Image (spheres, rainbow, N blue to C red):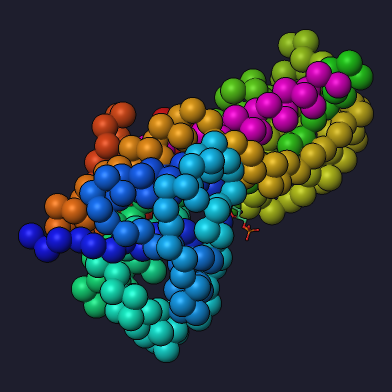
Amino acid sequence: MNKIKRIAVICSGGDSQGMNTCIKTIVNVCTVHNIEVYAFNRGYQGLIENDIIKLNNEMVENIGHLGGCFIKVARSKEFLEQEGKQKAFNNIYKNEIDGVILIGGNGSFHGALEFVKVGIPIIGIPGTIDNDLYYTDRTLGFDTAVNNAVKAIDNIKQTMLANSRGIVIRVMGRDCGAIALNVAVACNAHALSVKEVPKTIDQIIDDLKVCMNNGVESPLVILNDYIEYSVEDVQKAMEKHLRIETRGSTLGYIQRGGSPSVEDRLLATQFGLTAVELLINGKTDLAVGVRNRNIISLSLIHIWRCRRTLGCR
Ligand code: F6P
């Protein structure tokens, strides 16, 4: 078994809560094993530009409870080009990195396959609020994003109820309805429209009519990112057809910011520990995940293609 001396961490795509907890775990575990930890700032783009920093326990001591990403994230168009990839790999060789831990979502995992092709040891950790990777029940950030959205909607509901108004809320999640579905259930929404099960505005109005006939005063509608009509479109339709004053909000980045939930912190710690152990044990080309509360690892080559589009697990 090759002795791993240097690991590099890369966070790619959108940031998600739990990334910092995971970075802290990786650094702490590596220190115990006398492994040096480096980070390339700004994902694959920072790797291309050799934007590298050495991490130590002191630097990461107080980041575990913070949202955002200490080593920055980015999406890189240059990494899609052969020249960009070559520059990136040259920096791995130049810095004598023995293994890479990548934290990111579906697009970033696709990029990780390029490392597999050239034989650079790599382990993926799922980090995205969207929870759109089918092989894992959870991705880092999803639980916090759902909780943030629920807290925001609870607040909105209180003031809307006081005014007997209707409510329309758009949540994040790209083309995956997982955040929207979980939020809708947790907030007792009266209508939900997601890309996987889209409803027309007329269908939403029909659903709400039934609820209002049964005594609902402030009907709540949840839409996700990729629904083609706007919050305002639904708002106007509710005012016109249901004769109820209605307000709308697009929650946006409030969902992606803020301290990671306990669930995300625990998961990030387990993911970080497992990723380091896999590299130490000579394993590569794997992505870690969680199924039925057990930590698992599966081949990166097989997983990136299949995406979860909706899930309430
Ligand atoms: O994929 C993660 C995510 O946060 C999505 O939920 C959202 O649609 C997208 O990223 C936003 O990306 P950006 O930060 O580039 O605006």
Can the viewer see residue 237? no
Residue extending furthest left? Answer: 1
Image-based side of 246 in relation to 211, left or right:
right
From this viewpoint, which residue is outermost toward the front?
Answer: 58
User: Image quarter for residue 113?
Assistant: bottom left
Look at the image and tell me whether residue 279 can be seen. Answer: yes
Residue sitting at x 47%, y 35%: 264
Between 207 and 111, the one lying in front of the other is: 111
Q: Main secondary structure of the magenta part?
A: helix
Determine the residue positioned at 64% across, 43% down: 257
Residue 151 picture location, percent across and down: 68, 26
**Residue 164, horizontal then vertical, whole percent:** 88, 18
Residue 81 image point, x, y percent = 44, 84
In the rendered view, does 267 fall on the left or right side of 122?
Answer: right
Of the 4 image quadrants, the one containing the N terminus is bottom left
| Quarter of the image where ligand 1 sits | bottom right
Residue shown at 70%/42% (left/top)? 254
What residue is rendered at 27% in x and 37% in y? 295
Q: Which residues are magenta?
A: 134-159
**Above or below, 101 relative to 115:** above
The residue nearer to you, when weighing 12 against 197, is 12
Residue 31 coordinates in the image, percent (x, y): 31, 49
**Which of 183 and 283 lies nearest the eye of the viewer?**
283
Can residue 144 be found in the magenta stretch? yes
- Residue lying furthest bottom in this view? 83
Say whether residue 175 is magenta. no
Please give left or right for residue 135 compared with residue 145 in the image.
left
Relative side of 36 to 188, left or right: left
